[in-house]
Image: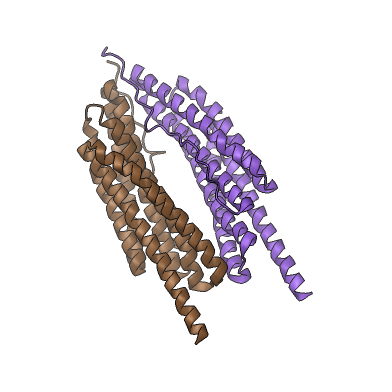
Chain colours: A brown, B purple
Amino acid sequence: MASEHIVSAFDQELNELKNKVSEMGGLAESQLVNALEAMQRRDTDLASRTIESDARVDEMEHEIDAFVVQLLALRQPVASDLREIIVALKISSDLERIADYATNVAKRTMTLAQSPQVRPAHAIPRMGRLAISMIFDVLDSYSDRDTQKAIAVWRRDEELDEMYISLFRELLTYMMEDARSISSCTHLLFIAKNIERVGDHATNIAESIYYLVEGRPLLQSRPKGGDEEYDRVDAPPDR
Amino acid sequence: MASEHIVSAFDQELNELKNKVSEMGGLAESQLVNALEAMQRRDTDLASRTIESDARVDEMEHEIDAFVVQLLALRQPVASDLREIIVALKISSDLERIADYATNVAKRTMTLAQSPQVRPAHAIPRMGRLAISMIFDVLDSYSDRDTQKAIAVWRRDEELDEMYISLFRELLTYMMEDARSISSCTHLLFIAKNIERVGDHATNIAESIYYLVEGRPLLQSRPKGGDEEYDRVDAPPDR
C-alpha cells in the first residue's frame, strides 16, 4: 500500500515534468511564430514583445533543470523513468536554443524594419513555416510518444537545409548586384541561418524522443546540411 | 568495510567521468586550435584533418552520456555527487558544440582557400586566440574546481563580443567597397560568429563549474553581446 502510494506520487511527478517540457515547447513555438510574423509584417511592436518574452523560456529551463535534479536525488529512478528525466533535461536545453534563435530573428527584425525591404526577404516565411511545422510535430510526437512522427521530423530537416542553401545563394547574388542591400541582406542571411539551426534542434529533439521510447539511440545517419561547402557564388563581372 | 569499498569504487567512477570530460575538452580545444591555424595558413590539409577528427568528439559525447545514465541508475547519487554527474552532461554538450563550431571554421577554410585572401581576415586570429584562451582557462578551472578562474572566463566573453561587433562592421564595409569580396567576407562573417559562439559556450561551462562547486547558480547577469542591435552599417554613397 505504502509502496503503491510512492509509485503513484512519482508517476505524478513524471507527468508534471512532461507537462512542463510541453509547456516550454509551446512557449518556444510561440516565440518562433511571433518572430516570423513580426518579420513578415515589419511589426517592431510584436518583435519587441517577442524579445521580452524570451526571459520566460529561460526561466522555464531553470525550473526544469531544478526539478530534474530534485527528482534524481529523491526518486533515484532507473530504466525508462530515468530516460524520461534525462530526456526532459536534453529537450529543454534544445527548446531554450530554439527560443533564442527566434529571439535573434526578432532582434534583427527591429534593425531590418529601419531599412527598405529587400526582395529575398520573401523566401524567409516559407523556411519559417517549415521550421514551425517541425517544432509543432516534434512536440506532438513528444506528447504521444510517437517515434514514427519523430522520425518524419528528423527527415524533414533535409528540406529545410536545402531551402537555406538556395536562399543563401540568392542573398549573395543580391548583395553583389546592389551594394546598398548588403546590410539588410546580411541580417537576412543570419535570420535564415537561425531558422536552419531551429531545424537542427527539432532534429535533436526527435532523436531524444526516439531514445526515450526505444531505449537506444537513433543510429541512422542523416545527411547534415549546411552552407559550408555549397555556397560559393562568384561575383558578377566588374561593372 | 563493504560500504567503504562501494564508496571508493564510486569515487573512482566519478574521477573517471571527470577525466573523460577533461579529455573531451582537450579534443574540442585542439579542434579550435587546428581550425584557426588552418584558416590562418590557408592549409586545406590541416582543415580537412580537423573536419575528420570531429567524429571523435561526438563519440566522446555519446560515451559520456551513456556513462552518466549508468552512474545515475547504479549509484543513485545525491548532493555534490549528483551535481558532478549532471554538470558532466552539460559540459560535454557545450564541448560538442564548441568542436562543431571549430569544424565549421575548418569547412569554411576549405572554401576560403580557393579565393584570394581578403583584408579583414587578419582580425580573425586575434578573436581566435581569445576564444582559445577562454577554453583553456575554463578547462583548467574545471580540473581545479577554481570558481574564481571560471568567473574570469565568464567576464572575458564581453571582450570577445566586442571584437566580433567591430569585425562585423569592418566586413560589411569591405563588402560594400568591393563586390568581389562578398562571398569570402560572408564566410568570414560566419567564422567570426562561430568564434563568438565558442565564447558563449565557454561562458556556459564557467556557469556549470560555479554551480558544481557552490551548489547554486551564478546569478549575476552578464551583458549579452551579439550583433543584432549594433551592426547597422550604412552603404557607401552610390558610385
Query: In this orientation, does residue B34 appear?
Result: no
Which residue appears at 45% of the width and 21% of the height? B118
The correct choice, above or below, for A203 with respect to B223 in the image is below
Quarter of the image for residue B178 reads: top left
Query: In this orientation, does residue A162 appear?
Result: yes
The correct choice, above or below, for B4 with respect to B145 in the image is below
Quarter of the image for residue A112 reads: top left
The quadrant in which the C terminus of chain B is found is top left
Residue sitting at the far bottom: A1
The correct choice, above or below, for A196 with respect to A137 in the image is above
Which residue appears at 32% of the width and 56% of the height? A26
Q: Position of residue A170 (x, y in %)?
A: 27, 34
Give whichever of B15, A61 is nearer the camera.
Answer: A61
Give whichever of A186, B143 is nearer the camera.
Answer: B143
Q: Position of residue B31 (x, y in %)?
A: 57, 41
Query: Is B157 positioned to the left or the right of A37 in the image?
Result: right
Quarter of the image for residue A231 reads: top left
Q: Position of residue A55 (x, y in %)?
A: 39, 47
Q: Position of residue A214 (x, y in %)?
A: 44, 70
